[in-house]
Amino acid sequence: MMNRRAFLASSAAGLTIPASQLSAASKKVEPRINLKKNVVLISLDLGLYAPNFQENGANCKYMTEVFSEFKGQMTYFDGISEKGMRGSHECQPATFTTIPYEDRQHYPQKKMISLDQIIADGSIQETRHKFLYHRINRGSNMSWNKFEQPLPAIEGANELYETLFSRTDTKLEKARIRRERDILSTLARNLRRYWRGNIQEEDMKASLDYQLAVLDEREKWLKVSKPYLKKAFGERDERQPIPSSHNNFQLIYDALEKKQTKIALVEFGAGGLNSGLAGVELGHHGNTHHGGYPERIYALETIDTGVLTAVKNFLHKLKEGGLYDDTIVLFHSGFADASKHTNKKAPAFLFGGGFAHKESVACLNGKEHIYSTSDLFSSILQQSGFNNKTFSNSKQVIPELFKA
C-alpha cells in the first residue's frame, strides 16, 4: 500500500507544471510574515578541506586568511552538525533540510523541506521572484519543497541573467500562464469527478489551489515593468565556474538591490568546478578523496579559496551598497569532511543580518551537542521575523546570536 509521502511525491511529479511552484498543504495555517531581512544561503556541494576550518576554532585558516576583515561582523560555529544525521553522500543534498532524502521515512514527524522554501512559503511575496535557487555549475539538489521533491535550479549566470534582467516577451509569458492555468483547471476537474475524500486528495486539492494562486501572482507581476540591465559578461564565462563566479554574485546582489527577490540559495556544485584553476587537474570529488597526497590537498585548498573569496567579495558588495545588516548570509555545507563521508563538525559561517555576532560559538561539548544545525536555522527564521521559528522540530535558537 502506498504511503502518504510516496503518494504526494509521485502525484506531484506527474504534474506538467514546474516543480518549483509546488507546495504541500498544512493543517495549521500560519499567517505569512513580511520578511525583516534578505536571506542568502550559499553552499559548496562537497564541503571544504576539513583541517582548514575545523582546527583551531575561530583561528582556523579560513577565518584568519579569508574572512579576517569581517571579525566582529560574522559568527563561526565551532563543531556544528545535525543530531542523528549520518554521513555519506546522503548528507550532501540535505545541507539545508537536515534530513537526507533516503532517511525521510524515518522522520514522519518532520518535514523534509529546505530553509529557503520554509522562508518563501511563510512570507508574503513582495518581489517579482519569491525566491531564487541558483546553481553556479552542475551539482546536487539543495532546494526541496514540501512534497520532498528537489526544485529545479536556475543554471549558470546566463540563465540567471535571462530570468532577472533581460528583455522578455510579455505576450509569450501570458500565453504560458494561460496554458498552465488550463492544465491546473483540468486536474482540478478530474479530482472533483473522482473525489473520495481521502487525505491524499485533500493535499492534492490544496496544492492545486496553491498553484492557481501562484499563477495569479505571476500574472500580477507582469503588469509591473521588469528592470532591464545590459549583460556584462560573455556566453562562455560560466564554463569556468570559480573564476567567473563574480558574475553570478553580481546578479544576486542586483536582484536584492533592485528588489527582485529577498531570498536566494546559491550553490557551487561539484561538476567542472576545477575548470580554469591552474594546477587543479582532478574534479572536486576526486580531490576530496585526497589520501594525504599534497597535490590533491593543494587542489582542494585552491577550490576552497576561490569559492570563499567569491563569498567575501559578495559580502563587500553588500557592505558598499548598504545591504549588509539587512541581509542574512550563511555559508554552509552538509559535508564536513568529504574524504571521510561525514557531516560531523560541518563548516558554517554566518554574516550580517543584524545579529549580535560572536567571533565563535561552541556547538559541541565533547560528543554532546550544545547547538545543532536546526537550531542555527531556527535562529535565522527568528531573525527574519517568523513567530513560528520551528525547523525540523527544533524550536531552540542560539541565544548568543541575540545577546548584545
Image (tube, rainbow, N blue to C red):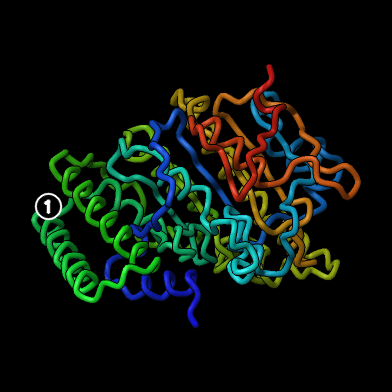
Horizontal and vertical percent for residue 193? 19, 74
Amino acid type at mark 1:
Thr
- Quick check: 145 left or right of 353? left
Q: How crowded is mark 1: few (under 14 residues within 10 Å), some or many (20 or more)?
A: few
Q: Looking at this rendering, what residue extends furthest in the top direction? A: 404
- State the residue position of label 1: 170
Location of residue 384 with respect to 246 vertically, above or below: above
Q: Which residue is more in the foreground, 216 or 209? A: 209
Q: Is mark 1 on a helix, strand or loop?
A: helix
- Toward the bottom, the furthest residue is 1
The answer, for residue 171, to whether it is visible in the render is yes
- Decide which of 31, 348 is in the foreground and name it: 31
81 vs 217, left or right, is: right
Image position of 288 (left or right of 260): right
Extreme-right residue of the structure: 366
Does residue 355 lie above or below 381 as drawn?
above
